[in-house]
Amino acid sequence: MAPDTVEPRLVVRGGQRLEGQVTVAGAKNSALKLMAASLLASGTCTLHNVPDIQDVHTMREVLEYLGAVVGFEQGTMTIDTTAVQSHVAPYDLVQRMRASIQIMGPLVARFGRARVAMPGGCNLGQRKIDIHLRGLAEMGGQVRSDHGFVEVTAEKLHAVDMFLDYPSVGATENLLMAGVMAEGTTTLENVAREPEIIDLCKFLVSMGADITGAGSSTIRINGVDKMHPTEHTVIGDRIEAGTFLIMGAVTGGDVEVNGISPHVLDLFLSKLRAVGVQVQENTRSIRAVGDPERHSAVDVATLPFPGFPTDLQAQMMVLLSVSKGVSVLTENVFENRFGFVDELVRLGADIRVDGNHAVINGGRALTGAIVRCTDLRAGAALVAAGLVAEGCTELRDVYHVDRGYERLEDKLRSLGADVERVTAPVSGVC
Ligand code: EPZ
């Protein structure tokens, strides 16, 4: 960062009890894939309830780089892919957002070619794409890499019966999109079952695809000749919903999140109840009432859906850090997703990491400090910690948070939080 420009920071002053209602935005981890899937047809797709977050703007840049014309205002996005003629995703865009890899399936399916810069390192772990590439190769794609790019070419993709080594969300999505116009019937087993997969399948079917089994471990795709543009509303963001429920609970507050169906957070909600948070489920909203005096330790292990979501692991660690007793939190999805523990310890948490286990000696009083966001969900978790810490917490590298949370400080202020975004030129704004 040049000295004369100061990075924005979030300043949180703890002690306020959150209370009220907040509506979640459209799901980041669906919207990005729907944008990529629009490449499968020539013409204009319209998406509603698209979140206004940095990753969506980055994916928009990727689509425009390919030649698409994208309009986006008030949550509605139009994507005209008529003029798409490139098949290359450059390093700078991929480095900014790994989800750029999701354009590979649709580009190979429609144009027979995709060339995507291999994403660099990531602070969650390796983030391999071997399952993506093995599937594309088994569908007839020629896969090669050179100069830091991975390229897949295919005259015409053909159907495949394939077991995924791991129910990878991204691999499931790329292979789904590759299969919709492949010759024959593709059967994918051991696929991801996340709600965002179901949303993508609904979108693809409305574009003319023939898909069954969405949300189960086996998806079948009968290849069609052509796909056509469509209109679709993105599902609510379950991770944003879970984040706000934890932010309310740790402050002993009463928060209701609207625009979300509880069934997408079943196991997460049962863990909140096990801690001692009162949870009320309605058709399109979830309400959580915290009582910190009652909150107690619970063991949590992250798993692919319907298991406990890895994207709520960091937020849950904050709640367990201030709940009485010893909890063990196990991260099974990413090999390095405890990067933010050191920051939480700076706020006074008592956590010991041993491999993919974090032993949390809870019931500690947190005190505010300067901390650094290490990734998107860790940043949100540190905001939650600041809400309950005594005094003032200053968060650096908030660009991570801006990748996936729309107007976070506005929504928190509407619930009574004392949080602001500052660009003061000196450190130590607290
Ligand atoms: C998606 O990432 C989400 N991102 C992640 O959310 C989420 O944490 C993850 O799914 C798991 O739910 C988007 O949807 C944009 P994976 P993805 O492929 O697709 C291994 C957030 O904060 N793997 O299911 O990259 C991989 O190394 C982000 O919103 C392979 O080994 O997740 C990882 O350990 C963070 N080979 C595990 O699977 C492969 O070919 C899970 O990865 C692919 C994945």
Image: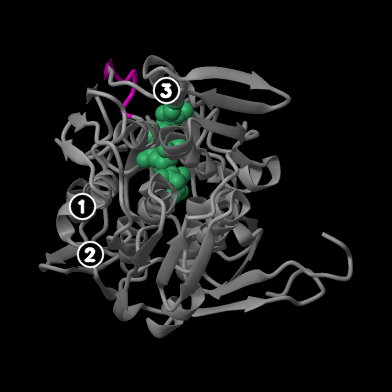
The amino acid at mark 3 is Leu
Q: CA distance from mark 2 to mark 3?
A: 34 Å
Q: Is residue 50 visible?
A: yes
In the displayed structure, does residue 137 sit left or right of residue 215?
right
Residue 260 badge: 2
Residue that numbered label 3 is attached to: 136
Residue 349 is situated, as x and y percent measured from the top left of the image, at 50, 51
Q: Nearer the viewer, mark 2 or mark 3?
A: 3
Of the numbered discs 3 and 1, the one sitting upstream in the chain is 3
Extent of the magenta region = 161-167
Tell me which residue sits at (33%, 60%) in the image.
237
Do the residues under discs 2 and 1 have CB atoms within 8 angstroms?
yes
Left or right: 396, with 182 as reference point: right
Front position in the image: 25 or 11: 25
Which residue is denoted by mark 1 in the rendering? 264
Quadrant placement of the C terminus: bottom right
Query: Distance between the Cα atoms at labels 2 and 1?
Result: 8 Å
Q: To which quarter of the image does residue 89 belong?
A: top right
